[in-house]
Each structure stands twice: as structure tokens, then as C-alpha cells.
Amino acid sequence: MTANTSPNTYPNTYRAAGVDLDAASALKDRIKTVAGITFGGRVIGRPGFFAGVYERSPDDDLLMAASADGVGTKIAVGQTAKNFRGLGMDLVNHCVNDLLTTGAKPAFFLDYIGLGHAERDDAVEIVEGMAEACKAAGCVLLGGETAVMPGLYAGDDMDVVGVIAGYVDRSDLLGGEAAELGDVLIGIPSNSPHTNGYSLIRRVFDIDNHPEVLEETEWSPDLGRSLGDALLEPHRSYLDPVTPVLGMIRGMAHITGGGVFENIPRSLPDGMGADIDLTSWEVPPLFRLIQKQGAVDRDEMFRVFNMGLGMVLLASADRADEIMELVTDSWIVGRVVERDPGAERVVLI
């Protein structure tokens, strides 16, 4: 059977693909409230940031930071294409980037792999990818849990989750409170959808019913490779490019699930938002293809995908040139502005 490469004639949304971002946000808010009960006086920063920060004692200036994440349904695309090693790299790099938003450097990584059966090689290949990414990030793959749970995971189904921990000096700590009105937002490009939006991608290209579409080369002149290779490019790590400017910025936002609309506000104080200039960068061909094939609304695309912005740095305008000279292939994408309570905090202009 040949995959249908014609554009969809009906609009696609993340909700139609089974992911209700509003419901997910409400659930996270409830969980943050419960988690906050445990905080006491040792947690620094507010719940809901990209990583949590913990002080061992008020006199200790070396702070601990940690974060946890998964790779979402990208794992289903990887299984279909039998490309597993990249999923392990996805997992580590996503966690490294979340940790980096605090200014912390990774120290160790832990993984969880849930399986329906143990007679398989794909789990080993995923861990090989984790090890490669950990080595590149200078952290240790310290341990983890491999759970075989038939009946919960059917057939070859599986899931992977990672936890990362690191350290940051108190004087170098970044968070979501330092940005000021007039600050600039400096974008650093992504290299793929990273680890978000794959439920919608699977729906747009009907990958579950037509796995052969991953080998489709009709779009290769724009993508430079097959659809599958473009979709499974491992999540980029921003540790190396961002480290030299950590002392020059006020904060950063890792553009993951929820896109710019949900992630940039996590790095801004209350009462502030951002105007994003859509003319400041060219959206990569893969995202334009997804939008065209799926008849996906523009704002929906920016709410689901990173749209070519993998990390956004917040800095004073007078330091922008210095930062962009050190972080090659970066550009100003917007500014921090005042926002009234209840207003959309990120506006595309």
C-alpha cells in the first residue's frame, strides 16, 4: 500500500490527535500545588520551572538542580523506523537543556524503561544513545530501572523516562524572575521537532497506518533527506553553545511542549510577556510541511512545536551583540513587554 502524500483536506489540531494542552496545563497546575506543600524553605524558585533547585543548607552556595522528562510519542515513530539509538540521545539532551535553564551543569543521569517483554535489543540501543549523550554532556549514566510489565505494555510497546541532576553556584543561578522590560529574546535554532508534537505528526502523516511514509522522498528537495530521518533527528543539546554566555543573560526558555506560548512565560516575572517577531527567522521546511500537509492553523503550530526555536535567551539589549557573537547562528526574535493580568503573555507579531 502506498502512502498518501496529498495534503489533508480537514484541519488538524493537537486535541484531535489526543493531546489537550489546556487539560494538560490544568493538571500540571494541580500537581504543582500538591508538590508545593512539600517545599519548606529549601527549594529556590517557583514551581513549574524547567528544573527544580534545592539548597542543602543556607550556608552552602553550591545548589542542587534536577529535572525529569520523557520523549513522548516520538518513541512510536522511532519504533516504526527501527531507529532507537537517537531516542536515548533525545531523552538525555532534553533533560540537559531543562537543567541548563537554571545555569546548572549536569552531574548524573538516571533512566526508567518500561517494557512488555525483555527479549529485545531496542532497549539496549536506547541506552547506548543515552550513554553517548551523557558522555558528550560530561555527566554519568548512574543507574536506572528496567521494568517488564506485560499487560501494561502490549507487544513491543515501551516508554522511557529520564532524571538528571547537577549543580550550580548560588551566584550563577538563573530562574524566572530576573528579566526586565525592554530585554531582548535571542533565539537559537532547533534541528527538528525535538521531542514534542509527535502525536500530531503521526496523525498528519498517518504514520501508524502507513509506516512507509517515513521513507518517502517526495519532500527530500526541501528536507534534504527522507521524512523519517528529518523527524528522528535527535534533540539538540544547547549545553556547549550556551555555557560561554551564562554570566551574560538573565534567563532562558527551553522551547518544548506548548511552544513559545507556554515556555517563554516560565522564564518571565508576573506582569511581563513577550512580543515575538515572526519576520526575524525563517521557519524550517519540516514545520512548513507539517502545517501544509495537516492544514494546521498557524497559532496551533506555534503552540505545539518549537518552529525552529529550540532555546531562547533573555538578556539586556546592550549585551545582545556580545552574546550573539559568542553564540553563533543566533538572532533577536523579540522583546520583553508589559502584560496585563489575564492577557496572552506571548504575542506573535
Image (cartoon, rainbow, N blue to C red):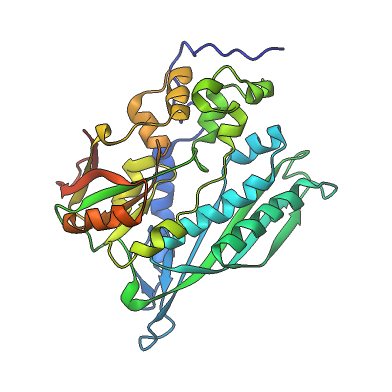
In the rendering, at what x and y percent does residue 202 appear? 57, 28
- Quadrant in the picture for the C terminus: top left
Q: Position of residue 174 (x, y in %)?
A: 33, 66
Name the side, left or right, on which 52 lies relative to 185.
Answer: right
Residue 302 sits in quarter: top left
- Quadrant occupied by the N terminus: top right
Q: With 169 as the anchor, is 81 left or right in this view?
A: right
Q: Residue furthest bottom?
A: 59
Relative vertical location of residue 216 with respect to residue 147 in this rendering, above or below: above
Residue 38, visible in the rendered structure = no
| Figure quadrant of residue 80 | top right
For this view, does 323 lie left or right of residue 140? left
The quadrant holding residue 333 is top left
The residue lying furthest to the right in this view is 119
Please determine whether, in this image, residue 227 is positioned above or below residue 242: above
Residue drawn at point x = 43 percent, y = 48 percent: 27
Measuring 56% from the left and 34% from the top, which residue is drawn there? 231
Q: Pick out the residue farthest to the front.
A: 325
Location of residue 213 in the rendering, given as x and y in whole percent from the top left corner: 63, 21
Count all numbered tags in the image, as a single digit. Answer: 0
Q: How far across and down, in percent of the image, does residue 294 sit?
A: 47, 20
Residue 7 in view in this figure:
yes
